[in-house]
Structure formats: C-alpha cells, structure tokens
Image (spheres, helix red, strand yellow):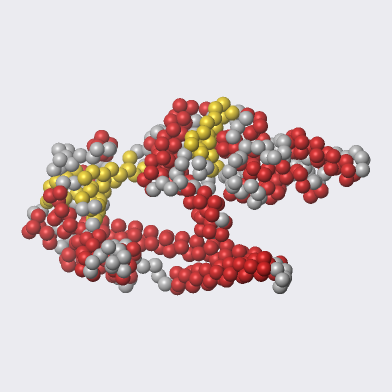
Amino acid sequence: MSKVTYQTRLPDSVDDFCGAMGRLFGKIERDLYQDLLKEKKLNDLKKSYQIKYQINARQFNSIHLILKGKIASRKECAQRQIKELEIKIKSLTNELKKFKKKVKQIPFSCGLNSSKAERSKAKFSSHQKQRKLRSCQDKLANLKKRQPSLIFGGKKLWHSQYNLVENGYENHEQWLTDWQNYRSSQFTLVGSKDETNGNQNCQLLTNGTLKIRVPKCYESLFGKYYLIENITFPYGQTTLEYALKKKQALTFRLVRKEGKWYVFCSFDVPEVPTQTYRKNGMIGVDLNPSVVGWSYCDREGNLKAKGQIKINIQDKNKNQTRAIIGDVVKQLVDLASNYKCPIAIEKLDFSKKKITMKEQGIRYSRMLSNFAYSSFSQMLVSRAHKWGVEIKFVHPAYSSLIGLTKFMEMYGLSSDTAAALVLARRALRTSERIPPKIARLVQVDSNRHVWSFWNAISKKLKGRKRHSFFSVANSEVEVTLLDECNNRFKGKSFDTSTVRRDSLPPILDLTVQSGFSDDVPLSLF
C-alpha cells in the first residue's frame, strides 16, 4: 500500500471556524509537548486533556500522532546535524594539514615579494580554516550536550522579532500577530478504517459535504457539526470516491496558506501490479547536472536504443526545478512502459560531498548545488510506482570508467549513455570483463574481483580533468608504451601481460578514449 494526498481550496466563510480550531489544537499540542517532556504518562494526560479542553478521544489521538511525528523528525534532524558537523570537522582537519604542509614548502626568500605574499596568503587561509574548525567543534559539542527542542511557529519567524525592521515589522505587536496566526494555521483529524467514512471527526459525504465534529467547547458557537458544502478535489476525486467505497482510513489536514484555507486528504491506495519484466531487458539512466543519458539493452546486455534528455536547472527555483525534473521522469517512465522493462539508476548519496563542497572550489560546488539527485530519484520512484514500472537501484562503482573504456568506442556512445549502459547491464547481473586492449597492458589477477582492476585504474585517474585523458588515442598509447618498454628492456622480448602496473610509463594514464567535455573530476563518479 502507498499513501496519496489530494488538496482543494475551502470557501472564505470557513475562516472563523478553522481559525478557532487551529488555535485550540495548537494550544493543546504545545501543552502536551511540555507535559511529555516532564515524562507524564500518556493515558493520564489523555483523560485530563479531554476534561480540560472538552475534546473527544479521537481528537486527542490526532493531536498526539502529529506531535509524535514532529518529535521524531526533530530528533532525526539533530542526528543529521551531528553527522554533518562530524564530516565537516574531518574535512577541515585534512585541509588544515595540507595548508600547514604547503606553508612549510614555501621557501623563505626575503628578497622575493612573491614568496612573502604566497606565504602570507597560505597562513591567512590556514588561520580562517582554524577558526571555522573551532566553530564547528563548539556547535557539535552543544548539539551533543542538549536535548533537541521544538519551536512551534518556526525558528526563523521566532528570531525575526529581534530584528523587526529588517524583517518588515513596524512594531512588536505586528510580529506577535503573525506569530500567533502562524501557530494556529493548521489542524489535523486522523481517521481509521473501523470508523464511518474512514474518519469519526471529519467525513466527506457522497453529496460533497465535509462534515466536521466540533469540540464541545465550541458547540455553542458552531453547533455539534460544522458543514462545508460543495467540496470537490480537482485531482483525485475518482480515486477518493473509490477509497470511500473500500472503507479506507481518511486523514484530513486543514491548512491556511496566504490567507486562504485548504483541505488535504490522505489515504492508502492499493499497489499497481508490476507491468515490467527483466526478460524484456533494462533501461539504465545516468543523471548529470546538464543532461540525462539513458540506454536500453536486451536481457543479454546488448545495446538496442539510447538517448539524451537535456536539462538546465541552474539558477532555477524549487518549483521550476521540480517541473523540469518531472518532465524528464515522465519521458523515462513512458520509455519503460513502451519497452515493458524496469529502470536501473545509481544508488547515490551526495550529502557528504555537499557538506564539504566549500573546500572543493567554486565550479565543483556549483555543479553539486545543481545536482538534484534526491528529487529526481524520489519523483522517479513515485511515478514509476503509479504506472507499475519497477525501479532497480544499483551500485555506481566505476560505471563512468567502464563505460568510457569498454562501450563508448564499441557503440559510439557519449559518456553519459555509456555509463547508463553499464548501469543497465549491472542490474541484469552481467559481468564486465576487462577489455583486451587494457588487459594485455596491465597485470590482472584472476583470483580477485574484477573491480580491483577498475579500482587501480580509477586511482591513476583520480582528481584529473576529463578532457586531459583523451588527447591521445588508444593506438598511439600502445605504440608509445611498446617503444618505452623496448628502450627500458633494451630490445629483450617480454610478455606485456605480465608487466607490473607501477613499471608502466606515465603515458598509460591516457588510455581512456575521448567523450567527456566537462571539467569535472572522475572521483565524483
């Protein structure tokens, strides 16, 4: 089962009722949070809160479930912050070691202004990184020391009271009004399968009327039930009616956005049967900041189709980025539906790289900032699930390198489509044997995993710009290599397959064919 959510706007006449409900539920939520911090028993709190605030048990349960989710989310965020700081501290420590080593290597040349300037610049950079390291260490110590806390209303809005003019407020009373309105801007009514129409406190009737159970404290103002008529959901009305017939649990969340109230309805829908099969092949997808490459191969791993989808998300806002990625996802899922095959994508995590990207240079940082892999994978999985397309997450190790050295020349592919082919073949569990043109030039141990070979090649290429690998063709490299070996062994015959890797001349570092154009280190892939 998967959960879906649909929304629609409510009429302006509900402002008074929804505002009162938001204030009541917000007050109860904050008080309940304080009592839970004091480790009071939940059952005792439930009974006392029903009497104190004149609410029923299901309304209390709704408030508690939402609060429980917020507490769990805050704890998870705190753990993520600790992890990010630990990674940043480790990165800064390594950078400091490099700077100190660099300072020692700069000669003391009293007569050369360039040496003095270079040494002064290195010392200044080292000092600034030392300050940043100390700041991160203090933040980490404070996070580990204190218990994560919640700010109902948002940390940003709370701190804006200390700079009223800069945040657009004339006085503190104006800020306080915004603060109180924001803290009462939503309330949730959780449903259950064993209740009428999937929810005891909020029901969507067949005639389109939303019937909300009013707490006893407000019955004198709004009556026992508050009715909102002519409620329709522009997207998902048919699915919602199906859920009502199947007696699914419906959860309603009413939210105020820009002065208007909206209702969000969430419920579970049955999974769509899988429509794709590995026997029909596999589509591999390689995501890059400016292009998405895809390759389709049959079940034997032979390339049958390929393509590129150009994207540009630089300097785009969140909604524009999601729209662009949504179009790409639609095209990929349509391809998989036509070929009746699953989609294979990389299982990547750029969180660590993004934490330390300030130390990697401006161009590298800009590329990582534009790399919306998380949004892409989430949207792809979501749409594929609706269309019954299976998604395979595969290990990304050496996919770009293997595509460059093995498939780019064979099929005339670009670097991204070659990497996509590797991912598709890996999802089909086909082996990637070492190309003969490279196998006879380096020592290969058949007893070890083939990735050990790719690891050795990757280490040689790590940190270099892509275009620098392709200035010499493979045939020229081999001729140069043989000439170098002949000179070294003075004409003696030898088997090149047994030559040690560390004895090969530096020209072997150019044994990858041309295909990349971006100045991006291969270590990213």
Q: Quadrant of residue 295?
A: top right
Residue 463 vs 276, above or below: the answer is below
Residue 139 vs 181, above or below: the answer is below
Q: Quadrant of residue 388?
A: top left
The residue that appears at 80% across and 36% down in the rendered structure is: 479
Residue 101 seen in render: no
Query: Relative to residue 394, is residue 449 drawn left or right?
Result: right
Q: What is the x, y in percent for residue 189?
A: 23, 53
Query: Relative to residue 517, is residue 277 drawn left or right?
Result: left
The quarter of the image holding the N terminus is: top left
Q: Which of 365 and 282 lies nearest the eye of the viewer?
A: 365
The residue that appears at 24% across and 55% down in the rendered structure is: 186
Q: Residue furthest left?
A: 220
Q: What is the x, y in percent for residue 57?
A: 21, 58
Residue 427 vs 352, above or below: the answer is above
Q: Which of 85 and 246 lies nearest the eye of the viewer?
A: 85
Q: What is the x, y in percent for residue 516?
A: 61, 40
Residue 171 seen in render: yes
Q: What is the x, y in percent for residue 437?
A: 75, 35
The residue that appears at 69% across and 40% down in the rendered structure is: 471
The residue that appears at 41% across and 46% down in the rendered structure is: 316
Residue 353 vs 150, above or below: the answer is above
